């Protein structure tokens, strides 16, 4: 059996960034965001930054219309803001992108863990533990007990994950209890 660490498989330096652009052609005005780009190296910023800056420079300053004088200043402001964001590496949306990859329960539990537990367990591991816990709860046995911890660690072993320590598991259980209380309070009519 191989033991894999519970940390993320992806590169920890990988980030997700969005870039801005501004288009003003005649009376058409649009300020938008790119799709999230996964940036793994420093040079990964260059191509999207240059592309969306080029779009903004060529199409961002040329609008006109009935209120052109008053709107021109806002078009220039939007275009220069887009250029500033692009040339500083885009806007970081890593947390938002990662939150969409996991269930609400996993995100809630993850956000209520101590930093020490987050250093040992990844969010993916927390997702697996919550799924195993749901399976254990269906069996009708007492939740959040030593037997429960043994069941989770045995199941993690079947998945080739290392065991989670008692302190970390207690922290995960406390966060799960908080989530259950949160659901009870918000589902009362």
Image (cartoon, rainbow, N blue to C red):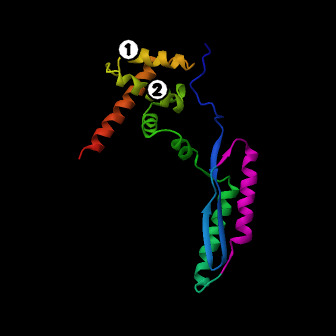
Left/right placement of residue 59 relative to residue 134 reads: right
Q: Is residue 39 magenta?
A: yes
Task: Give above or below for 45 relative to 180.
Answer: below
How far across and how far down the image is residue 35, in percent? 63, 54
Residue 143 seen in render = yes
How far across and how far down the image is residue 95, in percent? 54, 44
Find disc 2 in the rendering and name its residue. 129
Comparing 173 with 78, the one in front is 173
Left/right placement of residue 99 relative to residue 77 reads: left
Among numbered discs 1 and 2, the one appearing first in the sequence: 2
The residue under the point 65% across, 67% down is 22
Q: CA distance from mark 1 to mark 2?
A: 14 Å
Q: Which mark is residue 147?
A: 1
What is the chief secondary structure element of the magenta stretch? Answer: helix
Local SS, label 2: helix
The residue under the point 75% across, 58% down is 50
Comparing 16 with 104, the one in front is 104
Please identify the quarter of the rendering in which residue 106 is found: top left
**Image quarter of the N terminus:** top right
How far across and how far down the image is residue 170, in percent? 40, 22
Local SS, label 1: helix
Task: Give above or below for 72 relative to 36.
Answer: below
Decide: marks 1, 2 in contact (CB < 8 A)?
Answer: no
In the image, the segment drawn in magenta is 37-63
Residue 115 seen in render = no
Question: Of all residues shown, which one is farthest toward the bottom?
Answer: 66
The residue under the point 36% across, 35% down is 179
Q: Is residue 93 magenta?
A: no
Q: Which mark is residue 87?
A: none
Task: Give above or below for 13 relative to 130.
Answer: below
Left/right placement of residue 185 relative to residue 55 reads: left
Please identify the quarter of the rendering in which residue 53 is found: bottom right
């Amino acid at each position: 059996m191989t033991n894999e660490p519970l940390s993320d498989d992806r590169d920890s330096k990988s980030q997700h960034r969005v870039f801005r652009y501004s288009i003003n052609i005649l009376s058409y005005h649009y300020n938008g965001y790119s799709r999230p780009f996964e940036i793994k190296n420093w040079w990964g910023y260059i191509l999207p930054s240059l592309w969306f800056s080029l779009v903004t420079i060529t199409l961002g300053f040329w609008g006109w219309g009935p209120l052109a004088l008053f709107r021109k200043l806002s078009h220039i402001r939007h275009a220069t803001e887009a250029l500033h964001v692009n040339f500083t590496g885009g806007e970081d949306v890593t947390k938002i992108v990662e939150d969409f990859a996991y269930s609400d329960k996993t995100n809630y539990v993850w956000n209520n863990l101590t930093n020490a537990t987050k250093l040992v367990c990844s969010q993916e591991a927390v997702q697996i533990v919550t799924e195993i816990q749901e399976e254990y709860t269906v069996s009708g046995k007492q939740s959040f007990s030593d037997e429960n911890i043994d069941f989770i660690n045995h199941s993690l072993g079947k998945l080739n994950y290392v065991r989670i320590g008692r302190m970390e598991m207690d922290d995960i259980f406390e966060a799960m209890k908080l989530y259950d209380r949160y659901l009870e309070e918000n589902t009362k009519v």
